[in-house]
Image (tube, grey):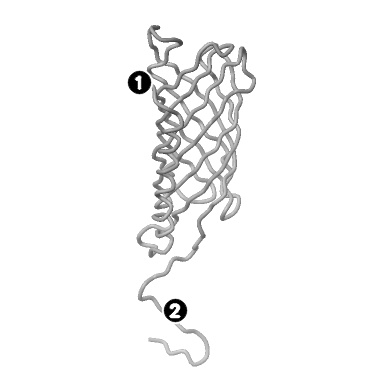
Amino acid sequence: MTKIRCSSYAALVLASIVALVPYAAKAQDMPAATGPGAYVAVGGGASLYQFEYGDQKLIGIMGYADANVTWRYGLEGEVRSLRYHSNEDVSETTYLGGPRITIFPGRLRPYAKVLVGAGHYNLPFNFAQGTFFTYAPGAGVDYMLTDNIAVRVVDFEYQVTPGFHTSPGQPTYQLVNYGVSAGISIRLTPLIKFPKMWGYKKKQYGTGARDN
């Protein structure tokens, strides 16, 4: 399996999120019929993962960004570092990004996602390091605490590294890690609760108003 550079993929994920910002902002001004609810948000949190290599549980931190062109469809990018509660200095850092779908709107927002990218692994006692292609289907629930602050109640990911190996010349195998995360995010784009409706005028009420 060809290795890829973490820094290059992290830049690609960040560029993809940034590229969606103007489209999300533009969607805020669209009529309701076109699907309001676009946003850009960034957040962070903590993770607990079952790590297959060495059969141990790793604790870490994560950062993520969501860019949606409608309330339902968008992209998510995340960086996660798992290096605490580790035996023998085993650790993992992932750089992932991909499509995310919100199931339905409201204060409680379940979602599903499929992320792809790079997983960087540090083996026992810094014996070796490697970066491999990794993909991660997942799902979770966000709770809108306010219009601009969302609590990531739970996020589950099933990370698969199909070409993992411990050293050059060793046979490859599929490494599977899975875990849960929780965090909080802040909306960066302005909120427009009632998008403009072109050609619409409010009806006058009260004394002197004419009923048509």
User: How far across and down, in percent of the image, does residue 39 sit?
Assistant: 47, 53
Q: Nearer the viewer, residue 164 or 138?
A: 164
What residue is drawn where x is 50% and y is 20%?
Answer: 121
Q: CA distance from mark 1 to mark 2?
A: 62 Å
Badge count: 2
Please determine whether, in this image, residue 166 is positioned above or below residue 34. Answer: above
Q: Crowding near pointer 1: few (<14 within 10 Å), some, many (20+)? A: few
Q: Crowding near pointer 2: few (<14 within 10 Å), some, many (20+)? A: few
The amino acid beneath tag 1 is Thr
Where does label 2 land, which residue? 202
User: How far across and down, in percent of the image, does residue 103 sit?
Assistant: 43, 44
Residue 116 left/right relative to 51: left
Residue 100 is drawn in which quadrant?
A: top left
Please determine whether, in this image, residue 101 is positioned above or below residue 191. Answer: above
- In the rendered image, the quadrant that contains the N terminus is top left
User: How far across and down, in percent of the image, does residue 75 sit?
Assistant: 41, 43
- Residue 20 is tagged as none
What residue is drawn where x is 55% and y is 38%?
Answer: 63
Residue 60 left/right relative to 175: right
Furthest residue toward bottom: 208
User: How far across and down, in percent of the image, does residue 57 sit?
Assistant: 59, 19
Where does label 1 land, which residue? 2
- In the rendered image, the quadrant that contains the C terminus is bottom left
Q: Secondary structure at mark 1?
A: loop
The amino acid beneath tag 2 is Lys
Please determine whether, in this image, residue 109 is positioned above or below residue 84. Answer: below
Give the label, 1 or 2, closer to the camera.
Answer: 1
Please determine whether, in this image, residue 113 is positioned above or below residue 42. Answer: above
Q: Secondary structure at mark 2?
A: loop
- Going from N to C along the chain, the mark reached first, 1 or 2, is 1
